[in-house]
Amino acid sequence: MSSTPASPRVQPLTPPRRFIPVDHARVDFTGGFWESWSNTVRDVTIPTQHMRLEEEGFLEVLDFDKPPSPLVRRIQPSGLSMQHFFDSDFGKWIEAASYTLKAHPNADIEKKIDAIVEKLEQGQMADGYLNSWFVRREPEKRWTNLRDLHEMYSMGHLLEGAVAYFEATGKRRFLDVMIRAVDHIIDTFGPEPGKLRGYDAHEEIELALVKLYRVTRDPRHLALATYFVNERGQMPSYYDEEARHRGENPEDYVYQTYAYSQAHMPVREQTQVVGHAVRAMYLFSAMVDLAHENDDPTLKAACERLFDNLTGRQLYVTGGLGPSASNEGFTREYDLPNETAYAETCAAVALGFWSHRMAQLDLDAKYTDKLETVLFNGALSGISRDGEHYFYENVLESHGQNRRWKWHYCPCCPTNIARLITSLGQYVYSATDADLAVHLYGANTAEIALGQTIVRLTQETRYPWDGDIRLALGLDTPSSFTLHLRIPGWCRAARVTVNGEAVDVKVAVTKGYVAIRRAWADGDEVRLSLDMPVDRLYAHPAVGEDAGRVALKRGPVVYCVEETDIGTEPQRLRLPAEARLDVAYDPNLLGGAAVLTGEALEAETSDWNGLYRTAPPALKPRAFKAIPYHLWANRDPGAMLVWLNEK
Amino acid sequence: MSSTPASPRVQPLTPPRRFIPVDHARVDFTGGFWESWSNTVRDVTIPTQHMRLEEEGFLEVLDFDKPPSPLVRRIQPSGLSMQHFFDSDFGKWIEAASYTLKAHPNADIEKKIDAIVEKLEQGQMADGYLNSWFVRREPEKRWTNLRDLHEMYSMGHLLEGAVAYFEATGKRRFLDVMIRAVDHIIDTFGPEPGKLRGYDAHEEIELALVKLYRVTRDPRHLALATYFVNERGQMPSYYDEEARHRGENPEDYVYQTYAYSQAHMPVREQTQVVGHAVRAMYLFSAMVDLAHENDDPTLKAACERLFDNLTGRQLYVTGGLGPSASNEGFTREYDLPNETAYAETCAAVALGFWSHRMAQLDLDAKYTDKLETVLFNGALSGISRDGEHYFYENVLESHGQNRRWKWHYCPCCPTNIARLITSLGQYVYSATDADLAVHLYGANTAEIALGQTIVRLTQETRYPWDGDIRLALGLDTPSSFTLHLRIPGWCRAARVTVNGEAVDVKVAVTKGYVAIRRAWADGDEVRLSLDMPVDRLYAHPAVGEDAGRVALKRGPVVYCVEETDIGTEPQRLRLPAEARLDVAYDPNLLGGAAVLTGEALEAETSDWNGLYRTAPPALKPRAFKAIPYHLWANRDPGAMLVWLNEK
């Protein structure tokens, strides 16, 4: 790795060779799973989140004309207030809300966003600096602690919000505020003499800058993102120097290692996913963006290694990641405890971002599989079915102590899952001039441009509750292009027909995508049938926690057993290896879902006297039911289990 | 429970009806398990602990004639320095060291203790107050925060040290210093008008005061302990009032609930063991002491309920207790995670104190069984075989990340396990005028007074490595008394003979003690044979963590499997239910121990590609070895497991 230059020159831009995601607003979910969730998030989550931001004092931080309100009480392990990064929360809320506006204009929401933007503009310092904490409370301390204080992280989320709002409404005011803020960062940080060689310990601004660049095409915006990614982890560490400058001993760093922020070595040398999980995912997402924009194979190669490390050794079956609360992140490989799983919602959402970006660079279902895993499991579990309660941590086992909350002292997750769902359309299809890739299944209609050709696609399916998908193509004139249909990794038998004629899937499939190149005509119909039995999954033997246990998965959906369905703690069950599991769609379960039923065994407790004895528990039959993991904790509180003991 | 008076009058003293432990110095371990550990602790642990106290600056806090040294960096979750209770650490060291002096006088150790005592005397305030932190740094803040600052906890440990040193050497200086300190506490706290109605949140002084009372027979000493125990948990809480007095909001309390300190309700109403585990054990030990001294059946009944709750629902198989690091204590019942077990050494040591006290009040092997469990497992695991490395947390599963340390920023555990072992003799026998109870087995000679009768007892055995015990009685004149021999709860077949003649154990046994009443003569010989097969233990089905798992125990010794013995992580093993386990004594294993060997199965990893798959792991044979749990982490670092997956 020593041949990697420390700060490579920005490469000349090459024309896009990758797939470009179809804009989310071009995809209209029509009935089915995602329409229901999209409606909930648009109609309930977005308005209630604004209410919470007001109720909880998050928006007060923007009252620059008043004295600052008292500090919130809860602090981080570093001893610093959460309030340092409140900006990120309304930045992310604006982004999430903006995604709803294109297809569903909403004057009230726009008014709320405009009010925030007006205050931000008012608070922006003359040189462009923008952060509500430092502007109001201690402007002299700005940029003195990139290690702990998240200034660029917060600006990055405002920037993502500004780009989304501009794209939704065409209004430039917020975007212009943020471009001035970025100009200020460019003036302050970089490799040039007289600038600080710093970079934010909490990644985020890097990927936001690429989003900005894709709007502005200003090469300085791309160059800044490139600088931050290249500078990361160079030694001696900027954070050491910065700490000494503050009069602190760098060894007093509360997290002890810069691996916490993926800043322990240059990014191209990293092979194991370490540290804070959300930071890692945001960094890797930016690395894919730069691999593309700078045509940089070294960043792509690093991402491929890191993706394989994550998915091969550190990912929960739900797509959750980062097992430990102490660093909100990774520990050792294969450390996947269930009851204490941190598996932050934000981390799963951000794995979705990363996976999706990887799939555009390299059309490989191994990436889209993980996007789909988080969408149906470890990210979606972060929001309640009513759209206004949340999980920060997504455990895979509970004894009933885990309850969804209305708000959180660190509310990063609610707006993150919201922005994922309000922009979900973008993950379904992507295109080049001559290719149309179908990544996700779910009932929708879409209008997709392949160069000059407009394809009107109708996808009819009850997915994920069954595996039959009908695609109808609408075309004004016949057109030749390649249709790429993803065959999910979990599917062991798939059938494809075009206008009733079978496609030889085995021949046509490459990296999990069936490629059908032909001259397509209006009314063409493609049918895809994905076998969707109940899978019993076993974990690698190095995952000691799951030894002797089995997880149930059907299609993309991971299942769990809740005490409320079976009347006993699922931890007491033993699922016989040969137990039959029936699938049935239950329309009354939280908006409808396929459930699994059968008979398991339950460990008898009535004959126990004390904690330990020399005879194993007696086992008696017990009716068994499993529901999709993402729906757990929406009914009566109780125990829950994903990895069931097998008998 | 409402009939319990809030502050009952001190009861008139009644003559002791309980068993009185035989003084530790009257019991001389002769070869075998405990002689080896006693020698290590006396010859290595005690001197090296004094070195650490010096090296780490603990003794500097007593340099009252110099300006205070800088604060130690590590702080508690409350934001307060550990240094507030450094006194407790050398108090406990003095106690541990003192226990060695009776049988093994050591001028150097005495000199070191005298030096500490001299400084303490010098630092004591004119009114008797004594705490190195407050005296030197902020005397005006003394007694303003009993909730967090451990002043009486520290004084309690000094007091235990003073009593032990007085009993070992007859020197009164330290004892007199501490009596003055206690007089000051009596002047300051109590139910009388003008006094503070406070009590320390970290229990300890209560049991220390009873020890003092047993030396002084000053009823005020007993009354103070009684007041503290009775006042505990009375509402409105003293800690609320005290916090408001400091200008703080009581709701900002970092641990959120006074259950953390067993101060959430009056002690006689408590039925579930909650909060900080060490605090709970110290409180309950004091409650037994007071149940005896005050002849108070309500305290005895509370202790019986709490003991059953602990041992029936909250105790690790090793005798470890308090699963959670966040409160150093208890969570919900049946929550016994293995890899994250906190199970602090101090808590197991203190469960030994409590169990032993219970057994004196009520000769029941269920108490002594737990004493023995911690002695051979969850307490002893806290010290390395070389006697100078320690565990604070005693996990039951590791992936190799747990290493014994030389010292700790909160070194409460090293001196606690040391004082347990240097005073171990007192746990072996106890007596009344007409009874001699044998609680523990292990080679020793002892001189025991039953009223006027002196019994010289010789115990010959290889226990715990086998279950054959020979007791030889030496008597100057024949004497009638009852010999009570404990039949451990783990033993399912015991044989007893007196001078070769069988005793009908089934008839003679009550609450786990065989009572043999007869006229004993010099040279009488009792033989006890305890069947000691390898037991497979299963946990109550409510302990989800241990479902499908088995622990191995032989006699009182819990076993574990270490990676270093089997060449693979024990988490990958499956132990067939029918697997034969052979027992062999290995003289070369860390001073000698019985080990278990056999054949298990190992989950194959070579055929895995990724984290999850639909086929269970293939299993292949793997030679299996288990060693006593208390010996783990003394050789090459690696994974360790107590609860093995059963096939």
Image (cartoon, coloured by chain):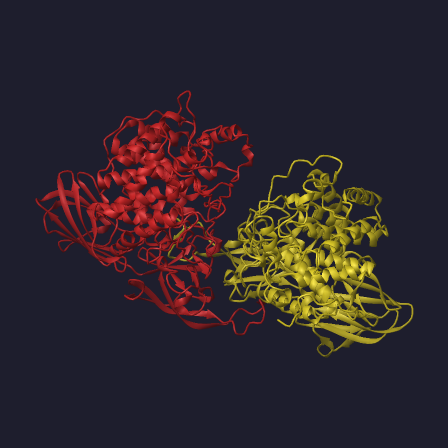
Chain colours: A red, B yellow
Q: Residue at x 37, y 48 (%)?
A: A53
Q: Is residue A340 above or below residue B367?
A: above
Q: Residue at x 55, y 72 (%)?
A: A608
Residue A489 can be seen, yes or no: no
Q: Is residue A187 above or below residue B509?
A: above
Examine the image and state in which quarter residue B599 appears: bottom right
Examine the image and state in which quarter residue B47 appears: top right
Q: Is residue B245 above or below residue A5?
A: below
Residue that protrudes farthest toward the bottom in the picture: B507
Q: Give the total number of marks visible in the rendering.
A: 0
- Nearest the camera: A563 or B474? A563
Q: Residue B228: image x %, image y %?
A: 69, 60
Q: Name the quadrant of the C terminus of chain A.
A: bottom left
Q: Residue at x 58, y 51 (%)?
A: B244
Residue that protrudes farthest toward the right in the picture: B477
Q: Residue A406: image x %, image y %?
A: 39, 55
Q: Residue B91: image x %, image y %?
A: 74, 48
Residue that protrudes farthest toward the left in the picture: A477
- Nearest the camera: A345 or A357? A345
- Nearest the camera: B418 or A64? A64
Q: Residue B72: image x %, image y %?
A: 63, 39
Q: Name the quadrant of the N terminus of chain A.
A: top left
Residue A521 can be seen, yes or no: yes
Q: Is residue A472 above or below residue B223?
A: above
- Nearest the camera: A63 or B38? A63
